[in-house]
Amino acid sequence: MTITTRFAPSPTGYLHVGGARTALFSWLYARKHGGTFILRIEDTDLERSTQASVDAILEGMDWLGLDYDEGPYYQTQRFDRYKAIIQQLLDQGHAYYCTCTKDELEQLRAEQMANKEKPRYNGKCRHTGNVKPEQEAVVRFKNPQDGVVTIDDLVKGEIVVANKELDDLVIARGDGTPTYNLTVVVDDMDMHVSHVIRGDDHINNTPRQMNILTALGASIPQYAHLPMILGADGARLSKRHGAVSVMQFRDDGYLPQALLNYLVRLGWSHGDQEIFSIEEMVQHFELDNVNGSASAFNMDKLLWLNHHYIMTSDPALVAHHLSWHIAQLGLDEANGPALVEVVKLLRERSKTLVEMAAASVYLFQEFDSYDEKAAKKNFTAGSDEVLAQLHDQFAALSNWESEALHQVIINLAESLGLGLGKVAQPLRVAVCGSGVSPAIDATIALLGREKTLARILRAVAYIRLAA
Ligand code: GLU
């Protein structure tokens, strides 16, 4: 059997982490089995769907690297097809026109509630058939009244639903537009979807969709319903738990690989392995190992993974993502060292790319003022002399490399009988503006001769003026 999976978001908001995990699992399953992964935009809810949301979903998929083999398909472009299928169901006696009014349906509902019955359509128009009445009418699917529907869910196990629990669902509204369950069924059938992997909030739709597929003579896909993602407090993950939009994670300085690794472990396991390259995810992914119960989102673990990937990924890849953050800060990368080198300098101390970009500002632009505390502590009487000597000795160097710069610093400290800090700290404040940076020799090696020397002279002048 050829494996075909799909991710079918409704464009009514950004791509959130729950959707991204559904997309990832569907993508992995297709990739693992050499199958096809489809992106389908379910935009039939014209009031709630927006182009901005479609763009956000496409951007999120792209940033995560979840490429699709087919699509994006748009359901709004398939209305003719849905209409044809609705007509087919009517003609074959699997559907009927219903003229029950809103008031009638409300009254029915009230009666059923009063009798402590489950509110459901009573089948009053079941015998109307396929002749379109004069007045406005919806089309209902004629759900079988006997027997059961059995879902062999690949995550949740066997779920049996009696047909008498399912009422006759509306498949076309009064204006003829198709409803959600109908469009999903037609698309899954036409697109030859073999595995429907989606959130378990859709589990109640599944037996209805299976009945419609059966009526259409279509084969039934396998279903895998993924449990929802919770916040740390056990409530369903939402905005109030912090970032939930995939692109917000980019903005907050996460690498897509870290988020993917985090998401794959959210409800899925392979032994006790925590770190997975994309290739390993593809190799090991199986729906069998998806946990049937909800899992909680853990920001600390994601942060830990992010730091891991910042440190261990190819610096060129990290640099590619850092570039975006450098631009966000209004900095011009052309004014500083190669980003690959910046990554190597800062990766150990940066848990996010936002931190890394913030820590690299002095490499790309002059600073206006020194950190007050650091200047007070380190620009003391005599430090101007130390800096002036450093300047001259650095200027005399023929090669501007960490090792040589390091030697100058320790030799000067020794010859002046000073602790290393008394030389390195004033230098650090002079070139970085603050008392924190990675190893100072590596920092000025990267900053370059010209900028370093100019900044040292500027600090000497500053100290002398202040004295
Ligand atoms: N469009 C639905 C949603 O965004 C998903 C439908 C499906 O996966 O079958 O929740």
Image (tube, rainbow, N blue to C red):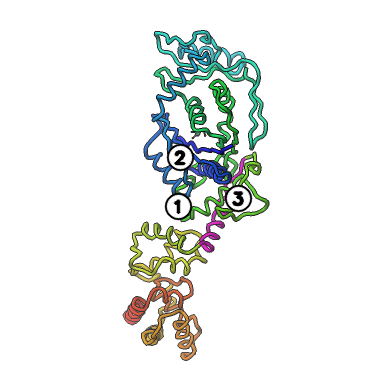
Q: Please report whichever mark, 3 or 1, sits nearer to the chain's N-terminal start.
A: 1
Q: Is residue 297 shown in magenta?
A: yes
Q: Which residues are magenta?
A: 294-313
Q: Position of residue 453 (x, y in %)?
A: 35, 80
- Disc on res. 418: none
Residues at marks 3 and 1, CA–CA distance in whole angstroms:
26 Å
Contact? badges 2 and 3 (CB < 8 Å):
no
Q: Nearer the viewer, residue 422 or 317?
A: 317
Amino acid type for the residue under numbered disc 1: Arg
- Disc on res. 283: 3
Dividing the image into 4 quarters, which one contains the N terminus? top right
Would residue 197 be seen by someone viewing this image from the given angle?
yes
Report the magenta stretch's main SS: helix
Amino acid type for the residue under numbered disc 3: Gln
Q: Position of residue 435 (x, y in %)?
A: 45, 72
Q: Position of residue 446 (x, y in %)?
A: 41, 73
Instruction: Using the image, determine if residue 132 lies above or below residue 312.
Output: above
Q: Secondary structure at mark 2?
A: strand
Q: 10 Å neighbourhood of mark 1: few (<14), some, or many (≥20)?
A: many
Residue assigned mark 1 = 250
The quadrant holding residue 222 is top right
Dividing the image into 4 quarters, which one contains the C terminus? bottom left
